[in-house]
Image (cartoon, rainbow, N blue to C red):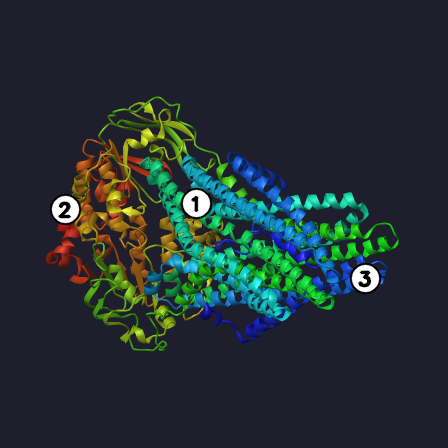
Amino acid sequence: MLKIARHLTRRERVRVLFIFLLAVTQIRLDLMIPEYMRVITVTAQTPGSQLSEVITSGGIMLLSAALSLACVFTISFLASRTSAALAMRLREKVFSKVGDFSMEEFSRFSTSSLIARSTNDITQIQQFIMAALQMLLKIPILAIGGFVGIINTGIQWFVAALIAFVFVIIVVTCTMASVMPLFKKMQELVDRLNLTARERLAGRLVVRAYNAEAFHEQKFETANDGFTRVDRSTNRAMAIMSPVMSLGTNGVLIAVYVIGAFLINSAGQAEGLQVFSGMVVMTFYLGMLFNAVKFVTKVVPRIPRATVSAKRIIEVLETKPAVTYGMLGDVNTGVKGEVTFKNVSFRYPGAGADALGGVSFTAKPGETIAIIGSTGSGKSTLLNLVMRFFDATAGEVLVNGVNIKEYSQKTLNNKIGYVPQKSVLMKGTLFSNVAYGENERGYFSAADVENAVRIAQAEEFVGKLKEGLNAPVFQRGSNFSGGQKQRISIARALCREPEILIFDDSFSGLDYKTDRALRDALKTELSNTTKLIVSQRIAAAMDADAIIVLDDGSIVGMGCHSELLESCDVYRAIAKTQLSEEEMAS
Amino acid sequence: MSNKREQVESTIDSGGKRLQGASMGTNHFGNVAEDVENYGHTWRKLSAYCKPQMRVISVALVAIIFGNILNVLVPGRLRTLTDIIELGITGTTNLEAVITIAVTLGIMFGFIALLNFLQGFMMAGVTAKISEKLRTEISQKINRLPLKFFDTVSLGDVMSRVTNDVDTIGQTLNQNIGTLMSSSILFVGSLGLMIWSNWFMALIAVLASLIGFLSSKAVLSRSKKYFKTQQASLGAVGGHVEEIYSGYNIVRAYNGMKSASETFSELNGSWYRAAWKAQFVSGFITPLMSFSGILAYVAVCVVGAALVMRGQITFGVIVAFIFYVNQFTQGLTHITETFPGLQSTTAAGERVFALLDEEELADERGKEQKLGNIRGDVAFEHVNFGYDAHKAVIHDFSLKVKAGQKIAIVGATGAGKTTIVSLLMRFYELNSGEISIDGIPISRVTKEDVRNKFSMVLQDTWLFEGTVCENIIYNTEGVTAAHVTAVCKDIGLDGFICALPLGYDTLLNDDASLSEGQMQLITIARAMLKNAPMLILDEATSFVDTRTEALVQAAMEKLMHGRTSFVIAHRLSTIKNADLILVLSDGDVVECGTHAGLIEQNGFYAELYNNQFR
């Protein structure tokens, strides 16, 4: 929490101080109200007093009430602005921090957790800061003010007040102590409830196909039952709090009166009057003290949740991205679009074995390199290293003869057009998706976009749409089929006119006809662009300049189709499952 | 006597103003019900849920009533006590009387605390029960809703109703119902007493409090607006964050972070502008109400004093009135303070009941016909279907399949392949036409019966949180561990599972890093284990590499032998040996026949097939 507070600006810190001063003023004003209330009551009760006296006192009382109201409003104004501004700044910082993350951090935190950290957790912090500024700050003022007042008024009552206060504190502490772990547990149970609900909703087809409705209903009921039990226990435990607090307040009130009665009885008249007024003042201070306790019970239950959120946010902010970029801009090294792997090895963080080991090859400008291999053989990993989603554990990756770590992020990305396995479309239009991001020219013209769409074989289906390229794309591109999304995603890469194109099994959603046409178009129209293609389909690899066969992270074969059929067992095995006898032979 | 206001406040405060649970935000004004009719509807529904709890609620209510009667009696006793002590200043104090009153008061306070605790304790139980029941009903409802329903809503939204909305209902009810009941009693009681003792002064007091009440109402409707904008802008920020984070590889690779940050700052800024106003305004109600309480007090004193001086009333009336006004305004304040909470109850309730009111699947308990031991003849007759009533996906589709045949369905994405098998499984109901198994229309038997006859592997792999073994067995009965291992060995999954930390007992959850291919193999094992008379494979091996696929293929062939099976596949090599290949385009069968026949036809299929080798 303190670390979060460090993100307050100097101006906001001054504001917090100002809130504190306002709170002191407000509490002082509030103390005046009962005083005048007493004066009015006495005046009204005293025969022969003037109406003007009542009006004057009433006026002063209303004035202090109005001033106190103004203080509350100002505090509320400052507190809401400060807490919202802090939340806005934290969210901004988290977002831009995440923007520096590599895939390593993404897989460590998980995407959904990062989303929660940027939204829910920040909201938690905002609400806690708001409550803290409005209530937490007042607690010491009330407590210290109350105790000082009591001691000044008369030590006789101090003991009674202390006993009642200690009693309340003990009950509150015990309740809090027993409820705190429950609150934490509650969070886990909410997650559990979410999980059981989410899994059956996501798998609803399978659930119904297997007639497993009852199975999941029961699983949910178990979670529901656990949650309800803890929920009920916390609420019941909390139910004791406010009755005990008022019992304490009222009990000490009686004690004050009784003690007062005895003191007055044994005192003289002058002294008695003093004791009586002291007794009355006493009750105000007690009120302050118990208000402090009330605020404690309102703020404290929020602390565990806010602390957890604060920790989660700080964790993001303090993470150092595993991948950092160099300063090198675009330099002319004489080659354009060359990719070289020099003895590259890679191990995923926390994994027991290398995902890639000792990989070396060169893709010359304009060449098409196909990478083939079974699931988990390291094909995508290899491409991820070129993209710097991860960094090689050993060896180096060069583009145009320069280690990719030396390029600035922008420069490296400008050289590459990347098409992922799972197509990602952004909310907007088809046009905005194809013209996404920026390259060295900064923007894309309508002609660029149309050309990219044509090469990506998307022209046909785009032409059928009423709005054409201006057709809206919903979040995640949910209004387009897998094959359509894939073609738009390919067009997006082409639009950048990169030196190197990277396809990570990006043709899987296309039927064979479209797949073929696309590969032909790439070959004829982008003959100067280097292409790295990962594929499951051997047909996609067959006409590449070179095929790299990966098995278990190592290159087990490299060459053209016919060479590999001769020399590489793994390749032959793959080919066998996909090609007919004649084709194997030819 | 000057302490009365403070004291009254603290006793009333115990009347049910509860701590906010840690899981609650400060505010829940969002999505406030605009519609009065909906308002009534939601509360009628909610009160139906309270009915079974009526006994407990009545006991709580009795506790509240008695607690408040005691509350009303306390000020009088305290006044007497003060008077006695005050007398002691000039003369002697009647200590005996002091102690008697003190003891009486002590007992009264004790009872008030006890009754309040009792009330709080019972209401906590009641609200927990209500929320539990709501969650259970939603959970059961999910199973009774047609699958069509889930195609149109976001799952996150359904989930949020199960957890957030029900939670909001529970929390806000728990915090506010007790307060509302006891404050109302106090409010009505003190109003009655005021009118009874002097209607004119009562009028003054009510008018003065009305100022506070009306301004709070104005504030409330203002804050409603701000909270709506705040929730909406928070939603926008969340949506943007989700889009950027989930497409992060693209954002990163395309230098998209700069424009993403710009959009983000814009959204974040408009969130800020709405958020601080919402927070600011929502803090107004309590201070406004307490100010109007003081105003009412002063008004009563001034008018009262004037009346006394004119000799129209006695001092006693003013003194009594001061207490009444305090109780009256306190009651009103607490009632006003419950409004925002109850508004959120309504909003959340509306969402929950909207889901519970959704149209359900037809009740099939009356269907007595059974499929029994089937041969596996399947017939589609003039089947028409559309996910959307006016947009047909399948038009007049007819097909006769003999028992034991292997049917392959091919075609481009969106051609309707998955739809055909979904209809066979009765995931959706036909618009017209009929599907029958062994001559029995599947609409005449229960869905469970139909689904029991198929082993199905879907395109999207789905595992639930549980061990590997549980995931493979799933809902199939009478399976031994040996069965599971045998099936896994058949499809080459055994080796991988044994390499997992706990083998077949390894828990599969979000952290378990299985590849799509491995997950797919588990779902295949699940289907093979079910061992139903018919088989549906929808792109079952799309994520599996070709070598493993061959292994799976062999196991499948063994499984398919003698069973009617429907296979959807991109890789045409896997379906070459099918008895019948259907080529779909836009929901119509454009070609059908065997592999050899179709190649000979040299049409759409032949083109597809040849393309894959070029």
Tell me the SS state at disc 2: helix
Query: Are dots 2 and 1 on a single chain?
Result: yes
Q: Is residue A422 visible?
A: yes
Q: Give the label, 2 or 3, closer to the camera.
A: 3
* Disc with the residue nearer the chain's start (2 vs 3): 3
* Label 1 in the same subunit as label 3: yes
Per the image, the residue denoted by label 2 is A581
Disc number for residue A228: 1
Q: Are marks 2 and 3 on the same chain?
A: yes
- For the question of whether residue B173 can be seen, the reply is no
Instruction: Output the chain of dot 1.
Output: A
The outermost residue toward the right is B310
Q: Residue at x 80, y 46 (%)?
A: B198
Callout 2 touching callout 1 (CB < 8 Å): no
Which one is in front, B521 or B414? B521
Residue A374, percent from left and from top:
20, 54
**Mark 2 is on which residue type?**
Glu
Quarter residue A504 falls in = bottom left
- Comparing B266 with B612, the one in front is B266
| Three-letter residue code for mark 3 | Ile
Within 10 Å of disc 2 (Cα), the crowding (few <14, some 14-19, many 20+) is few
Q: CA distance from mark 2 to mark 1?
A: 64 Å
Q: Nearer the viewer, residue A407 or A168?
A: A168
In-front residue for pair A507/B93? B93
First reached walking from the N terminus: tag 2 or tag 1: 1
The residue under label 3 is: A55
Give the crowd class for mark 3: few <14, some 14-19, many >=20 residues within 10 Å.
some
Quadrant of the rendered image containing residue B249: bottom left
The mark lying in front, picked from 2 and 1, is 1
Residue B99 placement (x, y as % from top left): 64, 53
Q: Nearer the viewer, mark 1 or mark 3?
A: 3
Left or right of residue A339, residue A330 in this image: right
